[in-house]
Amino acid sequence: NTSTVGTSSRPEGASGAGADRSTSSSSVESVRSLWDMGLALFRASLAEDTAGSRGTDGNDGAAPHSATNDVLGKATRGLLALVERERGGEAVDRAKVKRLTRAFRSLGVYSDRFEAPFLDATRAFYRAEGMTFAGRSGESVGEYLAHCQLRLAEEQRRCDDYLESGTRRALVQSVEKELVDRHVGWIVDNGFDAMMEKSDVAGLRRMHALLRRVDGGLDKLRVAFGSAVRARGVAVVKDEENDRDMVTKLLELKRRADEVAEESFGGDEAFNAVVKESFESFVNQRQNRPAELIAKHIDGKLRGAGKGETEDELEHSLDRAMALFRHIQGKDVFEAFYKKDLAKRLLLSKSASNDAEKSMISRLKAECGSQFTTKLEGMFKDVDISRDVMRSFRSDSERFAKVEAAGVELYVNVLTAGYWPTYPTVEVSLPPEMDALQGLFRDHYLGKHGGRRLVWQNSLGHCVLRAEFPKCGVKELAVSLFQAVVCLLFNGNSGSDGSLTFEEIRAATGIEDKELRRTLQSLACGKVRVLVKEPKGRDVEDGDSFSVNEQFNERLYRVKVNSIQLKETKEENAATNERVFQDRQYQIDAAIVRIMKTRKTLSHQLLIAELLAQVKFPARPTDLKKRIESLIDREYLERDRANAQVYNYLA
């Protein structure tokens, strides 16, 4: 408005007024604001106070924040006292603290006169607090870790509320150093194992989160984790008296270790590697046995041991077992026992699910390659082909009419010898009707497939007998072939009192002595007693007599007579291990010849090193040396005449 009036009434004056304003503007720019002027005066006054304080104390040349009797020093002491009271749990006026720290910042002395002594006080406070906690028992480690996290969160809030943002990093590092870094050994040694034992996922997660903040913290945690897993695993594997529960316990340990690695340690690959290395170290400490027991565990699952399991649960159980299988080195041992158990499941119709069986084969194939599962897949193929063979036999009207006339149902599995386990040939004198049926099938099959040879595996046969008992009437008995042959002897061939002695049964059946004793024991001494033994007892002795159990009274129409013959004996396990050992020798021999054929000449040490790299099972150098000596004896190799430690290949 002034400019407008001046322009209309006094044009000349307008020009003069403009010049005045220009001069005035230039003068204002050279003069500081009242705030800046007051701040400068206040800073100067504080500087004089500080200088006077130093002169009085004789502290000339001391560090800026060492002058504590001036106004700034007193303000700093007051601030530090407020912070310490707040750390001790008292409520303080945070607004006042914030105003004071802003004043320090505005005066340009925040870093020297407040931050440095504040960080020193922080380190001293938490150093004392950490030492107090570290003197307690291991049970307080979990509480201590929670306290550390609480303190870190408090300091973060303190930075947000009234400290400079630049202070945050140094403050947090100070707390981490005094509460965590100084006590890493105590935290791990006194707290980790107890948390692992209790599967304290939350506590271990907290420990991981804190130790990752300090240099070397995670390295110590990994070492402790590996030691804990190995110690528990070795205890399970070495406990020979509880081999029955070994796989179940190892699976539970694997589940817990994986859970800790995933949930507590955030799926860190380094911790997953620790689990893998730990399991590989202890699972192979007992050669062959863990591989055998894993195969038996899977056999139990596929037989339907967990009958309450759904299909998804069964698949999950197989996945867990495969996770354990990956760690064993003797996979050929696993294959031998798995193949033997698979044969029983297929031949005795014991599989809970054909889909689960094939799913398991697919897992093994994906894990070990197609060569590993060739024989297993061949077994399934034989079972399928056998169905076609039986359809062909039933269409042979002339021969099958005789089978129907005998009133007996016959089913034969034709097995390719190279695919299936090796079974000892056990002789038995079959009843005439059974022998005749075998002859009819043999004539039909060999008539269709000339040049082949059929060998009857009597130990794998099983039957369903229809029997009539005085108390419970007609029942069906599911028995092995040997049990059926013994039972049929009592159809009118027993003595005047209806009994047969052990010697009479042995002569009539032709069954080998040990096998016959097991068979009679299952019939007369088991849970389901079809026969009665005199004298009573658990073992079958020479001279014992047997008769039909007139008191037999089972509620079910079809009764399964458990066959001791089907249960594995120590001899069978030893035979399986021996076959694995022989297969390994052949593989070592083939590897030696393959290497030497390529290299022509090689030193002993280099040959051993290449063999250890090629063979897929644990082998000792002494065993490899024996195979080398064997090949020298058979003239595949020779020792170099100039150096006995060098081998030459003989074409």
Image: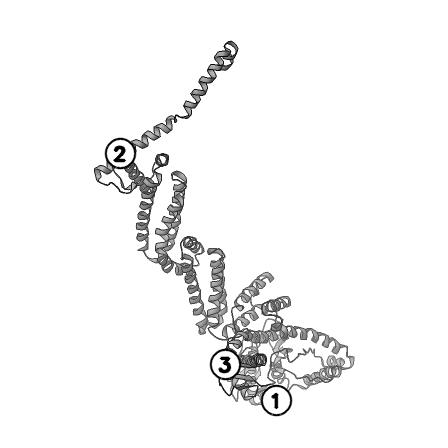
Instruction: Note whether residue 50 is visible.
Output: yes
Among the 4 quarters of the image, the one containing residue 225: bottom left
> Residue 414, percent across and down?
68, 79
**Which residue is tagged 3?**
604
At 44% from the left edge and 54% from the top edge, which residue is drawn? 205
Residue 111 in the figure: left or right of residue 521: left
Taking depth in this image into account, of 50 and 79 the one nearest to the observer is: 50
- The answer to whether residue 538 is seen in the rendering is no
Name, please, the residue furthest toward the top: 9
Amino acid type at image mark 1? Ala
- Whether residues under marks 3 and 2 lie with C-beta atoms below 8 angstroms apart, the answer is no
Question: Which residue position holds label 1?
Answer: 508
Residue 596 position by quadrant: bottom right
Residue drawn at x 48%, y 59% as measured from the top left? 261
Decide if residue 111 is on the left or right side of residue 492: left
Looking at marks 3 and 1 on the same chain, the residue that comes earlier in the sequence is marked by 1
Query: Would you place residue 637 above or below residue 206 in this image?
Result: below
Q: Amino acid at mark 3?
A: His
- Would you place residue 69 above or below residue 583 in this image? above
Residue visible at 65% across and 74% down in the picture: 378
In this picture, is 179 found above or below 625? Answer: above
Q: Which residue is mark 2?
A: 49
